[in-house]
């Protein structure tokens, strides 16, 4: 995953709490300034669910509900943490190379 | 029909069941600017059946089996449209031109849902098959009858155009009927495993790639473009798509 990767963005906003698809994109817009296209967003959601990094929230929820709410799994949290730590190391190294002291 | 509904309909059924409403809302909110991304996303999801979020057990395998027969039917119509082609026509005098049929037919056989060996289930499936295929069978019979009565040879002008339209309409009707039959039978039948379906898709893709290659080889040999270049490209694209989806469906060993 990369920092601008749709899957990374979805995991990041879901780490804050369960959201449905449209709300996930609204949260991504607040974070990055732009919405993901529907193909990128729902492709990312499908891939993340297939990898067990996210799952439908609430087992009692009706499968046919209009907006399905998704939540991050423990594996998803571990993956996100590992990715963010790696990005942080790269970011620190890059800023040092540019002569900028990280805050 | 609204564009948002149409584009949402391009997504695999499992994705539509799970996020169809959200996809439509996004498309309506963003507008035409989001259409290319949405269509590309739908194509990518069709090529990655292992990522479909199943809303019931066996949904992916059922859809993949039907999709295989849809691709096969589309291929048959495509090849019929560019015939006569010496490159891919089944001919006992030129066995090589039938080469592509071997993996294609093997793929279809592997992907076919098997009827459960229970008398009641078999009887239900027979009824479903008769109901589904009665229309296409009647249309095909009428076409054969018209061809053998000499009406076709004497036709001209509007009658000729109507007969050509009837011919293609009947072929399309029969192809759709076959796909609907597989979809209806798959609901109660024993579906092939993901591994078997993956292999079936790869075999179908191999058959389509062979057909495309045969077209190219004959074009090079004869120095002319047999059939049509568009058909060769379409076959190659269908081959790449089915092989990719087949590989994706194969269970991975970690």
Image (tube, rainbow, N blue to C red):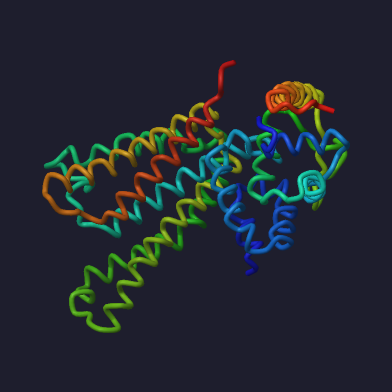
Q: Measuring 75% from the left and 53% from the top, which residue is drawn there?
A: B22
| Residue B165 vs residue A42, the one in the foreground | A42
Q: Quadrant of residue A58?
A: top right
Quarter of the figure with residue A13:
top right
Left or right, residue B115 beside residue B57: left
Image quadrant holding the C terminus of chain B, namely top right
User: In front here: A57 or B180?
Assistant: A57
Looking at the rendered image, the quarter that the N terminus of chain B falls into is bottom right
Specify whether residue B26 is in view: yes
Q: Furthest residue to the bottom?
A: B157
Quick check: A6 left or right of B165? Answer: right
Q: Residue at x 43, y 35 (%)?
A: B243
Q: Position of residue B49 (x, y in %)?
A: 57, 37
Quarter of the image for residue A1 reads: top right
Q: Residue at x 45, y 60 (%)?
A: B134
Residue B124's spot in the image, x, y percent?
57, 46
Q: Nearer the viewer, residue A90 or B152?
A: A90
Q: In the drawing, does residue A23 fall left or right of residue B104?
A: right
Residue A65, given in percent of the width and then of the height, sits at 81, 50
Can residue A63 be seen here? The reply is no
Q: How many marks?
A: 0
Q: Position of residue B165 (x, y in %)?
A: 35, 72
**Looking at the image, which residue sits at the far front?**
A99
Point 50% across, 45% down: residue: B67
In the figure, B252 relative to A17: above or below?
Answer: above
Residue B151, compared with residue B12, is above or below; it is below
């Amino acid at each position: 995953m990369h920092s601008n990767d749709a899957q990374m963005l979805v995991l990041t906003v879901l780490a804050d709490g369960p959201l449905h698809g449209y709300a996930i994109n609204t949260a991504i817009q607040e974070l990055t300034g732009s919405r993901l296209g529907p193909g990128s967003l729902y492709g990312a959601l499908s891939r993340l669910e297939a990898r067990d990094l996210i799952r439908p929230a609430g087992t009692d929820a009706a499968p046919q509900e209009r907006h399905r709410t998704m939540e991050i799994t423990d594996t998803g949290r571990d993956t996100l943490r590992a990715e963010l730590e790696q990005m942080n190391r790269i970011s620190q190294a890059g800023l040092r190379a540019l002569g900028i002291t990280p805050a | 029909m609204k564009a948002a509904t149409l584009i949402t309909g391009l997504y695999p059924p499992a994705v539509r069941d799970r996020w169809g409403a959200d996809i439509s809302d996004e498309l309506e909110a963003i507008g035409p600017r989001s259409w290319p991304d949405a269509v590309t996303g739908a194509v990518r999801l069709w090529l990655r059946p292992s990522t479909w979020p199943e809303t019931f057990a066996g949904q992916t395998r059922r859809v993949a089996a039907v999709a295989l027969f849809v691709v096969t039917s589309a291929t048959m119509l495509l090849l019929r449209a560019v015939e006569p082609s010496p490159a891919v026509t089944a001919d006992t005098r030129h066995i090589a031109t039938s080469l592509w049929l071997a993996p294609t037919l093997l793929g279809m056989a592997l992907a076919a849902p098997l009827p459960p060996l229970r008398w009641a289930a078999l009887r239900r499936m027979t009824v479903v098959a008769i109901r589904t295929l009665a229309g296409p069978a009647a249309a095909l019979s009428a076409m054969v009858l018209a061809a053998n009565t000499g009406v076709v040879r004497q036709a001209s002008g509007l009658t000729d155009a109507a007969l050509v339209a009837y011919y293609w309409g009947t072929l399309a009707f029969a192809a759709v009927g076959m796909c609907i039959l597989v979809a209806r039978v798959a609901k109660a039948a024993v579906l092939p495993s993901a591994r078997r379906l993956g292999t079936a898709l790869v075999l179908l893709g191999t058959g389509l790639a062979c057909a495309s290659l045969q077209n190219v080889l004959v074009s090079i040999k004869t120095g002319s473009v047999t059939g049509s270049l568009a058909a060769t490209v379409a076959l190659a694209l269908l081959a790449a798509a089915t092989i990719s989806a087949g590989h994706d469906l194969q269970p991975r060993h970690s």
